[in-house]
Amino acid sequence: MEISVLVFSALALAVGCFVQSSIGFGMAIVAAPIVFFFEPRFVPGTLTFMGLILAGTNTYQLRKHISYRGLGAAFVGRVPGTLVAGWLLMVMTSQQLAIVLGGGVLLAVVVSLSKVKIQPTNQSLFWAGFASGVMGTATSIGGPPMAIVLQHAEGGKLRANLSAYFLFSCILSLFMLSYTGHFSWWHVKYALIMLPPSLIAIWFSTKVQHLIKAEWMRMAILILCSISGLTALHQGITG
């Protein structure tokens, strides 16, 4: 493994960790394309393991703000969403699936920008967890559905609940990746090698979180969701 590959991948992961620790999600959206460019084998195994460390760290830091009762519905929805994604991957081409998922995310962004306010009820959290399971399994980026449903929450609660959900999701995904042969100690080794810059980024984010206004967080969430949706559409159309 060339040193330059590790350095650039580590920096991309650090920036992604800073973004997610600051607004609640976005590590995969920011880091995945860059990491994949330098070392495709890091995606999704190493990226997901880094996501597990990030989610675990953030969940511990923000544990007082977590609403486990509300997240329960999202946890329940995540499991069948993962199974449905597995079925879709067998009956649809990756391009068709990318178009459907990308279009769904963009539609959710449009709804969010309208006067309709999505409330984080048990039903909406279940379906957000379901959609996140489908997207996370099919594209490695499952944050947008949950982030859109929780976008109006207070900053600390938003970060805490998204972190707790991602912790559960990463564990589930790593079990599946390991079962299918896409995750091994090789991925863990390189994740640990690239970990120090990400830990510094997570620490630094805790020092600036109080400067980030709620409206900035919501706009950042919608921008990242739009990027995710447009990227999926582009991949689906261009193949």
Image (cartoon, helix red, strand yellow):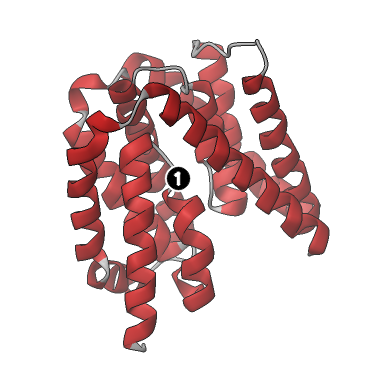
| 162 horizontally vs 160: left or right | right
Q: Would you call the spot at circle 1 few (<14 residues within 10 Å), some (14-19), or many (20 or more)?
A: many
Task: Estimate the x, y position of residue 237 in percent, counting from the top left.
Answer: 82, 57
| 187 horizontally vs 116: left or right | left
Along the line of sight, the residue nearer the viewer: 111 or 93: 111
| 89 horizontally vs 12: left or right | right
Q: Is residue 112 above or below residue 189?
A: above
SS for dot 1: loop
Q: Is residue 55 above or below residue 234?
A: above
Q: What residue did someone put label 1 on? A: 26
Task: Estimate the x, y position of residue 52 in percent, counting from the top left.
Answer: 32, 50
Along the line of sight, the residue nearer the viewer: 41 or 84: 41
Assign the N terminus to one quadrant of the image. bottom left
Q: Is residue 197 above or below residue 102?
A: below
The residue under the point 41% across, 53% down is 175
Residue 161 seen in the figure: yes
The residue under the point 36% across, 84% down is 4
Residue 79 seen in the figure: no
Quadrant position of residue 207: top left
Q: How many marks?
A: 1
Q: Which residue type carries mark 1?
A: Gly
Quadrant position of residue 8: bottom left
Along the line of sight, the residue nearer the viewer: 97 or 22: 22
Task: Estimate the x, y position of residue 7 in percent, counting from the top left.
Answer: 32, 76
Task: Estimate the x, y position of residue 64 in percent, counting from the top left.
Answer: 18, 21
Assign the C terminus to one quadrant of the image. bottom right
The residue under the point 47% across, 25% down is 74
Q: Is residue 170 above or below residue 107?
A: below
